[in-house]
């Protein structure tokens, strides 16, 4: 047993956090897939087994990626970005159309593959490489700022038409990386301001002209969230999530006793945080989950402080910040603080592509930690 555990290198706290997330995921999804089995056919056991298999495969990916030296990501950053752009374009043209959005590609045998998840990791690796190689020019507007922003804009622009929330989270993650990478604050503020103006312009144009179904969807979600006169049917998801949270109270109704899991849409994915609270309460459901992601962010900071090179430091920052922002957005949506976005809770929500690429991201973070530990051990010899 001891030899087996010794194979798991890197930050031990992160490994423990992943164990806890796996437990939460297994319990929450097992309880919340009842409605999915009822509406889409099949039985609950089939969906539970499918999720457990994805979690198991995620652990395999997690272990495999934590063994890969981070220098390989540095070397392949440009190629990964090109592949990501090609996949995103291919998805827009020939992707699978589900729930008024075209976000996935159909892969025989394996099912659907959400290309934006791959693009997130590819762009973060690219930005980390760019920042590490251009520290002397990063404060120059033409040589350092514009080139990296152009690539960020291309990838986020390809994601945005069908998945605006993912594009926004990725854009914000890259902004954080640029800020930590010593980009001038005035450049970032100007970029943020330009983004807000552009978004407002798109919304205004959308209200005065005919738009696609997807554009109407996210426009309606934003409008409904901030409007007090919305039709109650239009806030059905948000209201159901709030009821689930209220039912949970401080201590919850215990595992499997959720009453909202059968009527809350996407209870096993977008609103799984509400189901966790309903069954385990604020004390044993909400607080532990929030602390897990915050501890992950803290441990990433510990890893970064150990880095003697800039690329692994930027890589860890980008991957961790992206996961934590996504988690906070999911929690904010479930609690009614943010408009409905369709963001899963990393590693906890049901979903094959999400689990696999979360495993890859955490594996890369642990891989950096493992490399640093090995370098430190060699230095001490």
Image: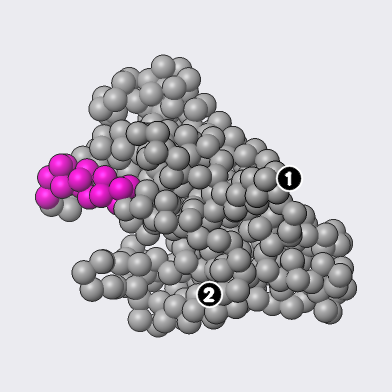
Q: Secondary structure at mark 1?
A: helix
- Mark nearest the camera among 1 and 2 is 1
Q: State the extent of the magenta-drawn residues as a range.
A: 42-56
Q: Where residue 126 sits in the image (x, y, percent)?
A: 63, 70
Residue 264 visible in the picture: no
Where's the C terminus, which quadrant? top right
Question: What residue does disc 1 label?
Answer: 305
Q: Are marks 1 and 2 in contact (CB under 8 Å)?
A: no
Relative to residue 249, is residue 305 depicted above or below?
below
Where is residue 183 drawn, in percent x and y? 82, 63
Residue where numbered disc 2 is placed: 80
Q: Residue at x 34, y 73 (%)?
A: 105
- The location of residue 76, given as percent across then percent down, is 56, 74
**Residue extending farthest left:** 42
Residue displayed at 86% across by 62% down: 184
Report the Cα–Cα distance between label 1 and label 2.
Answer: 27 Å
* Residue 256, position as x, y percentages in the image: 25, 27
């Amino acid at each position: 047993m001891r030899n087996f555990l010794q194979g798991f290198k890197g930050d031990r706290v992160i490994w423990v956090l992943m164990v806890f997330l796996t437990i939460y995921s297994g319990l929450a999804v097992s309880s919340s897939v009842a409605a999915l089995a009822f509406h889409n056919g099949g039985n609950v056991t089939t969906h539970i087994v499918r999720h457990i298999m994805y979690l198991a495969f995620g652990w395999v990916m997690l272990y495999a990626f934590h063994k890969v030296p981070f220098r390989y990501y540095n070397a392949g950053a440009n190629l990964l970005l090109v592949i990501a752009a090609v996949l995103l374009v291919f998805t827009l043209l020939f992707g699978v159309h589900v729930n008024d959005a075209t976000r996935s590609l159909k892969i025989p045998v394996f099912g659907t593959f959400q290309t934006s998840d791959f693009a997130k990791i590819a762009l973060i690796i690219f930005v980390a490489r760019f920042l590490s190689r251009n520290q002397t020019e990063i404060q120059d507007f033409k040589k350092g700022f514009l080139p990296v922003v152009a690539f960020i804009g291309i990838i986020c622009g390809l994601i945005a038409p069908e998945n605006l929330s993912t594009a926004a989270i990725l854009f914000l993650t890259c902004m954080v990386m640029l800020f930590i990478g010593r980009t001038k604050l005035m450049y970032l503020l100007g970029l943020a301001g330009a983004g807000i103006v552009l978004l407002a312009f798109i919304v205004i144009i959308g209200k005065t002209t005919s738009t696609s179904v997807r554009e109407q969807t996210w426009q309606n979600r934003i409008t409904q969230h901030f409007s007090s006169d919305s039709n109650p049917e239009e806030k059905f998801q948000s209201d159901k999530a709030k009821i689930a949270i209220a039912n949970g109270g401080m201590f919850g109704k215990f595992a499997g006793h959720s009453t909202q899991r059968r009527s809350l849409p996407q209870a096993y994915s977008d609103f799984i945080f509400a189901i966790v609270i309903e069954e385990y309460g604020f004390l044993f459901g909400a607080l532990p989950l929030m602390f897990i992601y915050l501890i992950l962010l803290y441990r990433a900071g510990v890893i970064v402080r150990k880095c003697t090179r800039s690329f692994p430091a930027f890589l860890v920052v980008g991957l961790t910040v992206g996961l934590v922002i996504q988690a906070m957005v999911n929690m904010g949506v479930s609690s009614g603080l943010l408009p409905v976005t369709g963001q899963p809770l990393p590693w906890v929500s049901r979903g094959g592509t999400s689990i696999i690429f979360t495993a890859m991201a955490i594996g890369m973070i642990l891989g950096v930690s493992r490399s640093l530990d090995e370098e430190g051990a060699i230095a001490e010899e």
